[in-house]
Image: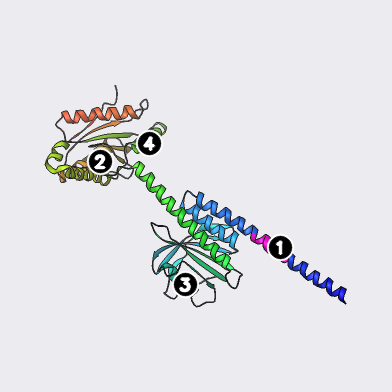
Amino acid sequence: MEASGGIAFLTERIDAIERERDELLVKSQRLEMLQRSFVDIIASTEERALAYAAMRGTWLGLGFSRALWFAIESTSALAALYELDGESACESEYGGTLPETSSLYRVLSGDSDIVTGWAGDFDAPLFDTRRRYAAAAVRPHSGETYILYVDGSNERTASAWSVASLQELATHAAFALERLRMSGELERLAMHDPLTGLFNRRALMDRLHVELATFRRTRTALAFAMIDVDDFKRINDTRGHAGGDEALKTIAAILQSETRETDVAARFAGDEFSLIMPRSDAAAVDAVMTRVYAALAAHGLACSIGIAFARKDQEREQLISRADEAVYAAKAAGKNCYRIAATSE
């Protein structure tokens, strides 16, 4: 009896050790998956990839079967941007209003950074909530707040480890979103003129290179304009430098509002602007110039504009030079008009 009892005890202990080993193995695999998700989140170069990495981490690392990445529209409404259901990740059309009794409302209103519960709870957030659910706020320092929502776990109660891990995923996502936004803002600043908001000279040259390549491939007409503000020194002398800045901003706004969506305006330097007009023949250019000059006149401003049509044997610098020469022709003609550069040497 004593021997059989000892064997039974050892067998039970071995079984317990094997269960613990299996549990540790599962936890180890989940930790590895979470680690990969953290790396993928930080390495993401766009919000969509970042959201998928966070959602995939909850599925592989935390044992949830579904994840939703919500964008907050207001304190009472939200809309899911992305959804991951098992291995299938897709855009989501899920959305709706949230009563104040909803657990997600507490996250939306900032009362809590994370909530957990069961599908049968009175404050279950979604009409199709699956088993155990959890939701964590993703709050970058700037911009809108998101919610990382997960459900479908078979755990009747949320473990402290899974809650902490979900919150860690949300925190990493918030930091990564902030980094993406800062990177995007730095890129925007590097490509735009701070006073007018137009493309700067660097961005202009990049875009002109692309448009010239398109012109050579398609042979569709490409026009380029150099725009010089008439009597800008007099504007500064009479209105002051602040008035001069306002004049430049007004001209920039006109170049954006009175041109076509395909046209690209830029501040070339000082009181000089540029305008790329793809797929534009002489008639199209005249229509744009008519609108621009009418708007300039309405604001008491005048510009001399030189326009050159691209030729297959010329590079950016030559096209700019020809348009610049046409500006001098407009000045010589009395200013406040446009002239088109000769199409041949």
Mark 4 residue type: Asp
Please report the residue visible at 20 percent of the width from the left and 28 percent of the height from the top. Answer: 328
Look at mark 3 in the image and give the residue it sits on.
103
N-term-proximal mark, 4 vs 3: 3
Say which of 31 and 297 sits in front.
31
Most extreme residue toward the top, as rendered?
345
122 w.r.t. 33: above or below? below
Find residue 287 and report its horizontal and vertical position in percent: 24, 40
N-term-proximal mark, 2 vs 4: 4
- Frontmost of labels 3 and 1 is 1
Residue contact at pointers 3 and 1, CB within 8 angstroms: no
- Frontmost of labels 1 and 2 is 1
For label 3, the crowd category at 10 Å Cα-Cα, with few meaning under 14, some 14 to 19 and many 20 or more, is many
- Frontmost of labels 2 and 3 is 3
Find residue 160 and report its horizontal and vertical position in percent: 57, 68
CA distance for labels 2 and 3: 55 Å
Look at mark 1 in the image and give the residue it sits on.
21
For label 2, the crowd category at 10 Å Cα-Cα, with few meaning under 14, some 14 to 19 and many 20 or more, is some
Mark 1 residue type: Arg
N-term-proximal mark, 1 vs 2: 1
In the rendered structure, find residue 119 and report the number of the disc placed on it. none
Mark 3 residue type: Ser
Q: Which residues are magenta?
A: 18-27
Report the colour scheme: rainbow
Look at mark 4 in the image and give the residue it sits on.
206
Look at mark 2 in the image and give the residue it sits on.
288
Judge whether residue 59 is colored magenta. no
